[in-house]
Amino acid sequence: MISFNHVTKKYNENTTAVNDVNFTVEQGKIVVLLGPSGCGKTTLLRMVNRLEPISNGEIIIDNENSMDLNAIELRRKIGYVIQSNGLFPNMTIEENVMIVPDLLGWSKKEKRERFIYLMKLIGLDAEDYRKRYPHEMSGGQQQRIGVVRALAADPPVMLMDEPFGALDPIIREKIQDEFLEIQKTVKKTILFVSHDIDEALKMADKIMLLRDGEIMQFDTPSEMLAHPKNEFVSQFFGKDRAIKSLSLHTVKNLQEVIGLARIDKSIKNTKTINVHQDLRNTLSLLMNQEADQVVVTNDQGEKMGSITIDLVQKYLHFEIKGKLSVSQKG
Amino acid sequence: MNSKKLIGNSVRFLIYAMVILFFIWAINNQYFTPIFSQSSTFFVLLRQHVELVLVSSIFAIIVAVPAGILITRPRFKKAEWVVTNLVNFGQTIPSLAVLALMISVLGIGFQTAVFALFIYSILPIFRNTVAGLDTIDKNLIDAAKGMGMTPYQILILIELPNSAYSILAGIRTAVVLNIGTAALAYVVGAGGLGVWIFTGIQLFDNAFLISGAIPVTLLAILADYLLRKLEYVVVPKGSRRVAKT
């Protein structure tokens, strides 16, 4: 758990980067700091491991004031991932990953076991990569290594500063999925900086939208899209925020609320889609009109029913538009 | 074979041919005889020459590398401009002038020559140390700090290994320059192979001139070669490619 109590960052009398920020990142949750550049999101993140000194207020990490520990010890307890992976070119992959355990004085055996476990987590062969150097790997692999390096000493808290920002869209999406999968097992408390709305909606349990060092709104992604607190928030997420919110729901959600349509066996030109696919991609597939019918399958590949644009619209009406109309009235 | 390769190979061939022709000419005129007829003197001079270079280079490394490290620390960063310019200025004073100046302070002999050579070796080593440390990706330092490395650990584990290539290049430049400049040590009576070179000049005796100059050249080439080999030992495998691009 990370709590911010009246945290303020002033560079001098006139420049305030972060102004009186109060919020809590719950145990095992991901909070994404989102906002335009210069909004103070990176500064806020870097104050947690004291790479930026705090001007005022306090940050409590797992019931301990961050100022009570010495900065070096504090940082070893916090995983840190940066955009440009920050792997050290002079060290092998194993040496890179095992930096913090090394600093903490783990034994050789403990380190080896941990390395094998971590590499398994990201689906890379430990033996194969142990002696390799960062420059021998692709950008996506380097970033994966950057992430597991932060997990190496099993810190309860992780700070991620636009960790996937430098990757191309296809790799980025894949690594985001992978990371969410890993998070299901490791359940870290994560503060995540991003300037990408889609990334924020996908990764966050809660989003904090910042502007000029002030909190604009701190809410779950669906609340944020459904009930933007002010003009800035609604503008930031854009006019298409209803469509964006579809990415927060899966075909499964739709099936549970309104059910799927029957499969018309007479239509030959069909496409299939997994039940865990999000509705935004589903809608996009439906609108491509590559197929006359889209059949939903479960993980075992069994056909569950078909889905149509009408159904998505109906669901949107129930789930989202209902909330939106409430918020517009209020 | 493309044209670039062709030009490269023909230039290389021309240079080899010129070197071989030079040696044939020198041997035909018996210009290397002093090395064999006065071999004991030759080895004394050679030893003096090597000693001058070794002692001055080692002192220069001991001073310039730590100075370069110190000046790139955040605490002293502001002084970098001043110190770098001071060192640059030092390099512009002609070597003979430094030798002449030092005679009045240190007298004649070995220590004066060593001191002058030392002054001359500082700049390349210092400048390459600073450049090597300054060009390290700031994100690496940030990551190292964020993971809880102490400033000392960052220096030893990250900064020095990743700037080793540049630092060693500076040392190599300094040593090779030094071997040439050490020929001037004769002027302050510190010996070295300069003795034969200057004798040759004064007596119009090509035999002494060449017997002094060629070993100096070979010494420089040998030092360059050995220090390049050392790079392969000292520079970490992963940083080598990064350093060269």
Image: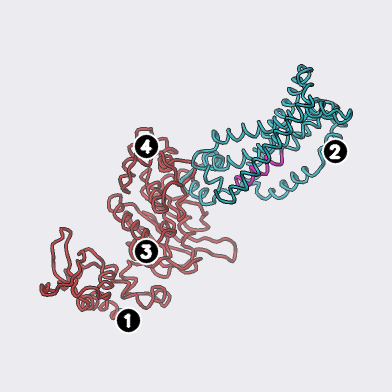
- Mark 4 or mark 1, earlier in chain: 4
Q: Residue at x 41, y 45 (%)?
A: A77
Q: Is residue B190 magenta?
A: no
Asked if marks 3 and 1 fall on the same chain, the answer is yes
Observer-nearest residue: A115 or B198? B198
Residue under label 2:
B97
Q: Residue at x 10, y 75 (%)?
A: A266
Q: Residue at x 81, y 42 (%)?
A: B93
Numbered disc 4: secondary structure:
helix
Q: Is residue B125 magenta?
A: yes
Residue B79 in the figure: left or right of residue A39? right
Asked whether residue A77 is in view, the answer is: yes
- Label 3: few (<14), some (14–19) or many (≥20) C-alpha neighbours in 10 Å: some
* Residue B67, position as x, y percentages in the image: 67, 40
- CA gap, disc 1 to disc 2? 86 Å
1 and 2 marks in contact (CB < 8 Å)? no
Observer-nearest residue: B242 or B79? B242
- What hue represents chain A? red
* Residue A5, position as x, y percentages in the image: 43, 59
- CA gap, disc 4 to disc 1? 55 Å
Numbered disc 3: secondary structure:
helix
* Residue B51, position as x, y percentages in the image: 72, 25
- Mark 4 or mark 3, earlier in chain: 4
Chain hosting mark 3 = A
Asked if marks 2 and 4 fall on the same chain, the answer is no
- What hue represents chain B? cyan
Residue under label 4:
A111
Q: Looking at the image, is mark 4 or mark 1 nearer the viewer?
A: 4
Asked whether residue B192 is in view, the answer is: no
Residue under label 1:
A328
Numbered disc 2: secondary structure:
helix
Residue under label 3:
A199
